[in-house]
Each structure stands twice: as structure tokens, then as C-alpha cells.
Amino acid sequence: MSQEDRGPMKRATEELDAAMKRLSESPHATVLTAFRRFTAAAHADGALSRKQKELIAIAVSIVKGCERCISYHVHAATAAGATPEEMIEAGFVAVIMDGGPALAHFSPLLEAIDVHGGESK
């Protein structure tokens, strides 16, 4: 995938980061801080590893139809050690639960994997 083709998914992650930065500098920073503490605790290794939780988050992001979320969680799953194949399997779990609409979000998943997680095999 060329650098030019990587734009939408990379841009989605950058836009999310920019929005969070803007909120963190606003009068609503305490709300964002509380949310971040909650998500950090929920994502921490426990009975499920961080990687497993990110794979679940990918599936939920697909079911919710949130392309920014897909990009964010593919990036996080990659950082947690998930392979493209594991992320694709998580995507198919979303399809089991949501059918065709989830399958329609495979394109953003594959794009995000190409940008954040390397080429799938």
C-alpha cells in the first residue's frame, strides 16, 4: 500500500488524537481524564490480556460501524502484539454477530491493518 493510500486510516487516528488533545485542554478535561483512567483500568492485563481486549475492541468497533475506532484499535492491537491474521479473525467474529453490515466494515479493517499492522498474509 502506497503512502498516499494510507491517508484515510492514518488521518482517522490523527484526527481522534487531535480531538482528544483539544478536549484535554478544555474545561471538560476532568471528564476526559476520568474516562481515560477507566479505559486504562479496563484495558489492563487481567484474566484477558491487553491483546485479547484489543481484538475484542476491533470486533465491537466493526459492529458499531466506527471507522475511527477500527483504526485506533488496530493500532493498539498491533502495539499489543496482535497479528494481522488475529485481527481479521476478530473481524469475522463481528460478522458472526452482525452479519452483512459487519462484513461491509471489513474494508476499513483491512485498510487499518495495512496502515498500522502490516500486510495480512
Image (tube, rainbow, N blue to C red):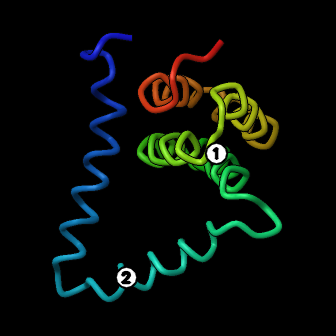
Identity of the amino acid at label 2?
Answer: Thr
17 vs 26: above or below: above
**Which image quarter: residue 11?**
top left
Q: Earlier in the sequence, mark 1 or mark 2?
A: 2
The total number of labels drawn is: 2
**Which image quarter: residue 4?**
top left
Identity of the amino acid at label 1?
Answer: Val
Q: Residue at x 27, y 45 (%)?
A: 14
Could you tell me residue 3's position as x and y percent? 27, 16
Q: Please state which of residues 114 and 107 is positioned toward the viewer in this rendering.
A: 114
Relative horizontal placement of residue 24, taking residue 73 as reference (left or right): left
76 vs 31: above or below: above
Question: Mark 2 falls on what kind of element?
Answer: helix
Could you tell me residue 80's position as x and y percent? 60, 48
107 vs 20: above or below: above
Q: Which mark is residue 102?
A: none
Could you tell me residue 119's position as x and y percent? 54, 16
Q: Which mark is residue 33?
A: 2
| Cα gap from disc 1 to disc 2, whole angstroms | 26 Å
The residue identified by callout 1 is 63
The C terminus - image quarter: top right
Q: Please state which of residues 70 and 85 is positioned toward the viewer in this rendering.
A: 85
In front: label 1 or label 2: 2
The N terminus - image quarter: top left
